[in-house]
Amino acid sequence: MPRLSEKLKLKRLYKDILVNDLLMLEISDENDGNICAFGQMACVKTIFIAENKKRKEDEIWEDFTFAMVAFTEIRYGCDFVHHSVPKSHQFLQDVWPDLDERRFRTIARVSRSTFQVLYDLIKDDEIFNGPRSCKQFSLETQLLVVLYRLGSSGEGATISKIASLFGVSDGGAIQNMTNRIFQAILKVRQQFVYWPDSAERQSLVAETFDELPHCIGYVDGTEIKLAEKPLDDPEAYFSRKHVYSLKAQAVCDYKLRIRHLVLGFPGSVHDARIYNNCSLVTQASSLFTGAQWLAGDSAYKLTSTVITPYRSTSTEMTSHERNAFNRQFSQYRIRIEHCYGILKERFNSLKELRVTIRNDESVKFACRWILVCAILHNIVIQQKDDNIDITDITEGDIGGEDEEGPETPNWSSSEGEAKRRAILTFMHASH
C-alpha cells in the first residue's frame, strides 16, 4: 500500500476531529434537553440551548474550513518530515552560479554556453508554460537536475543522492522533472538526429573519399547495461556478455554525430538481426545513392551497402592485400566505437541504466532515456563543446570492442564481395 503523505494524514486527522466535535455537541445538547423546567422558564431555556448549539457548530465548521484552506496554501504538512530531504536553495542560488567552468561541466556534463543553448531550445515548450507550470521548479533547476541524472552512474545516480544535492523531494519530483525535460527535448529530435539527405551524403563522401571511398558512415551495436534484472522476460535481456542489457545500434559520420539510431531490442538479439530489421535495409534504395555504403565489423553481413573487413578464414586476394585493407578499414571504422565511448563517458548513466524493466512502458522510457542522450550528444558536437579525449576512455567504455560472430554461415553477398574488391583496388592504386 502506498505511503501516505504527512499532509494527507493531517487532512484526515482534521476530518476526524470535525466528526468528533459535532458528535460531542449533539451529546451535550441531549443532556441539556433533559434538564427539567416549567412554563416560561422552559421556553427561554430551550431558545438559549438552541442558540448556543448553533454558535458552537458554526465555530467548529469555521475552524475546519480555515484548516482546509490553509492546507491548499502549503505544500507539505510540516516543516520537516522524518526521512525526507532537507529543503535548501543555497546550492542553486549561491553556489551554482559561481562555479568555475570545470566544476560546472562535472555537474551539468556540458559547458555554460551549451547549457544556455539547451535552455533556450526548450524554454518555450508548452509543458513549462501551462496553467499549472507555476507549481514547477524553475526550468533552469529542472534542466540541471536531469543533466546531472543523465551524467551520473552507480550510487551517485540514486534518487536520494540527487535529491540531497539539489534540495528537492526524493518522491516523484525528480521523475516529473525528467519526464518534462525528456518530452521537450524529444520534440526537437529531427533537428539533431536525422539521416543525411542526398546532398549531404555527397558531401560526406567528398570529405572522407581518401580514407574509405564512398563511405558515408560507420555502424555498430552496443549494449546498455541494466542496473537491475528485468522483471519481464529477463532471459531475453541476458546478453552474450552475461549481463542484462538493452541493445542500441547507431550509425555515426566522421564527425562522430549520430545519424541513425535503433532502440528497443533486448540484449540477447544479434547486431545483424537488428540491422536487417531497420530502415537502412528495408528502405535502402532511398537512403543510399550510387556506390555509397557503411563500414561495419565482421558481425554484419557483407552487402553492397555494408562493407566489412576480411575474415581470418577468407581466401580472397592475397594475405598481404587482406591485411592492408583491414588495417586501413579498421582505422576509420573505429569511429563508431569512439562515438559510443564519448556518449557513455559524457552521460555515465548509459554505463549502467537505473531503469527497471517491468513492462512495455518501462522499455519505452529506457529508450527515450538513450535517445535523449543521443540528441544531447549531437548538440554538444554542434556547439563544438567536446572536451572528452578519446584516449582517456577505458576499453570498457568503448561501444563495440568485443565483436559478435556471424549469425548465419552465409555471411556475404556476391555484390558485397565485388564492391569490397573494388574498394581494395582503389585503395591500393591511391597509395
Image (tube, grey):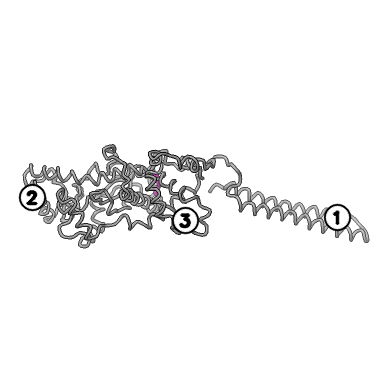
Decide: marks 1, 3 in contact (CB < 8 A)?
Answer: no
Q: Give the amino acid at mark 1.
A: Asn
Label of residue 425 in the image: 2
In terms of secondary structure, where does tag 3 sit?
Answer: helix
Nearer the observer, 87 or 54 = 87
Determine which quarter of the picture holds residue 226: top left
From the top left corner, tell me how far across and down residue 314 is, in percent.
Answer: 10, 46
User: For the residue carrying disc 3, how many other residues have a C-alpha within 10 Å: few (<14), some (14-19), or many (20+)?
Assistant: some
Secondary element under disc 1, as helix, strand or loop, is: loop
**Residue 273 sits above or below residue 330 on the image:** below
In the image, residue 226 sits, relative to residue 123, either above or below, namely: above
Quadrant placement of the C terminus:
top left
Q: Which residues are magenta?
A: 353-357
What's the residue type where badge 2 is placed?
A: Thr
> Disc 3 residue type?
Phe
> Can residue 231 be seen?
no
Mark-to-mark CA distance, 2 and 1: 115 Å
The spot of residue 153 in percent (x, y) is 38, 40
Q: CA distance from mark 1 to mark 3?
A: 64 Å
Residue at 48% x, 43% y: name it.
Answer: 92
Residue denoted by label 1: 34
Residue drawn at point x = 49 percent, y = 59 percent: 130
Question: Foreground: 419 or 138?
Answer: 138
Q: Which residue is denoted by mark 3 in the rendering?
A: 128
**Where in the figure is residue 347, as x and y percent of width and height?**
35, 44
Query: Magenta part mainly helix, strand or loop?
Result: loop
- Front-most of residues 181 and 365: 181
Where is residue 95? Give x, y as percent: 47, 39
Q: Residues within 10 Å of mark 1 (few under 14, many from 20)?
A: few
For marks 1 and 3 on the same chain, the one whose residue lies earlier in the sequence: 1
How many marks on residues? 3
How far separated are the C-alphas under marks 2 and 3? 57 Å
